């Protein structure tokens, strides 16, 4: 029998066909609260999450559809707009690494927590990296010192779980002896 985490990982997939059910504000907050538990270098948490749902979600969609991409987002019901800025690291760490050195990894952790946290409560997600920064900033209102490179689109779906397409194990895993 598969453990819970394994089945969660296997069920999470990028959803590009949301149904009409709205995502409640409380549900979005719950997902964000779970994601706040993500690890980060020196526990710096160099992120902010802007929760957008209801009518306001419609303002965010065009900023993620430049050049006609991501048409499926018309049906997305909510967004977590993730912004980042340079991290405040512990002194001995910052003597070796620039303050932005780990930020991308930290944001990756946050995304995993958002998408798996959402999946754990039945909310489907798709990470979006195709962003028009200035349009998104205008729609959400985050300050100049923050930048958003990833947004998570959220909603509910009746889609089947697809088989995962991944590289062959031999290509990505090497056993060192
Ligand atoms: C940083 C990042 C940016 C992504 N940007 C987009 C995007 O703009 N549009 C989209 O449809 N999917 C986007 N994806 C989803 C990937 O295409 C998807 O995760 C990958 O194909 C694996 O499929 P799965 O998520 O269903 O397992 C993005 C994923 C990541 C991690």
Image (spheres, rainbow, N blue to C red):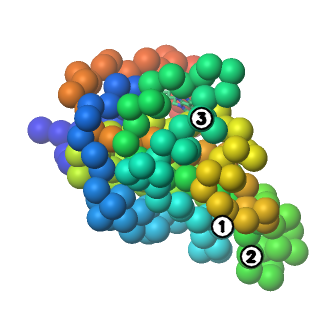
Q: Work out how far the residue at label 3 is from the one at label 2, CA to CA, in angstroms.
A: 33 Å
Asked whether, in this view, residue 102 is left or right of residue 124, the answer is right
The image quarter in which residue 11 lies: top left
Percent position of residue 80, x then y: 49, 53
Percent position of residue 90, x then y: 74, 80
Say which of 131 and 92 sits in front: 131
On whether ligand 1 comes within 8 Å of the CB at mark 2, the answer is no
Mark 3 = which residue?
Answer: 62
- Give the mark nearest the N terminus, 1 or 2: 1
The residue located at (73%, 55%) in the rendering is 147
The residue located at (26%, 35%) in the rendering is 20
The residue located at (47%, 59%) in the rendering is 51
On whether ligand 1 comes within 8 Å of the CB at mark 3, the answer is no
Mark 1 = which residue?
Answer: 46
- Give the mark nearest the N terminus, 1 or 3: 1
The quadrant of the picture occupied by the C terminus is: top right
Percent position of residue 46, x then y: 65, 67
Q: Is residue 101 above or below residue 170?
A: below
Asked whether, in this view, residue 11 is left or right of residue 58, the answer is left
Tell me whether circle 1 and circle 2 mark residues in contact (CB < 8 Å).
yes
- Would you call the spot at circle 3 few (<14 residues within 10 Å), some (14-19), or many (20 or more)? many
| Residue 10 can be seen, yes or no | no
Which residue, as the protein is rendered here, is positioned at the far front?
A: 55
Q: Which mark is residue 88?
A: 2
The quadrant of the picture occupied by the N terminus is: top left
Callout 1 secondary element: loop
């Amino acid at each position: 029998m598969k453990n819970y985490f394994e089945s969660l990982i296997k069920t999470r997939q990028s959803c590009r066909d949301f149904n009409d059910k709205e995502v409640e504000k409380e549900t979005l907050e719950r997902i964000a609260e779970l994601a706040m538990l993500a690890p980060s270098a020196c526990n710096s948490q160099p992120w902010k999450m802007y929760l957008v749902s209801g009518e306001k979600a419609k303002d965010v969609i065009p900023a993620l559809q430049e050049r006609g991409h991501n048409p499926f987002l018309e049906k997305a019901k909510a967004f977590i707009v993730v912004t980042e800025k340079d991290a405040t690291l512990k002194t001995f760490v910052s003597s070796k690494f620039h303050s932005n050195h780990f930020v991308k990894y930290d944001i990756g952790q946050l995304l995993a927590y958002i998408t798996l946290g959402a999946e754990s409560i039945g909310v489907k997600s798709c990470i979006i990296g195709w962003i028009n920064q200035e349009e998104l900033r205008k729609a959400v209102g985050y300050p100049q010192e923050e930048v958003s490179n990833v947004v998570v689109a959220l909603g509910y779906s009746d889609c089947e779980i697809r088989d995962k397409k991944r590289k062959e194990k031999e290509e990505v895993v090497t056993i060192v002896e």
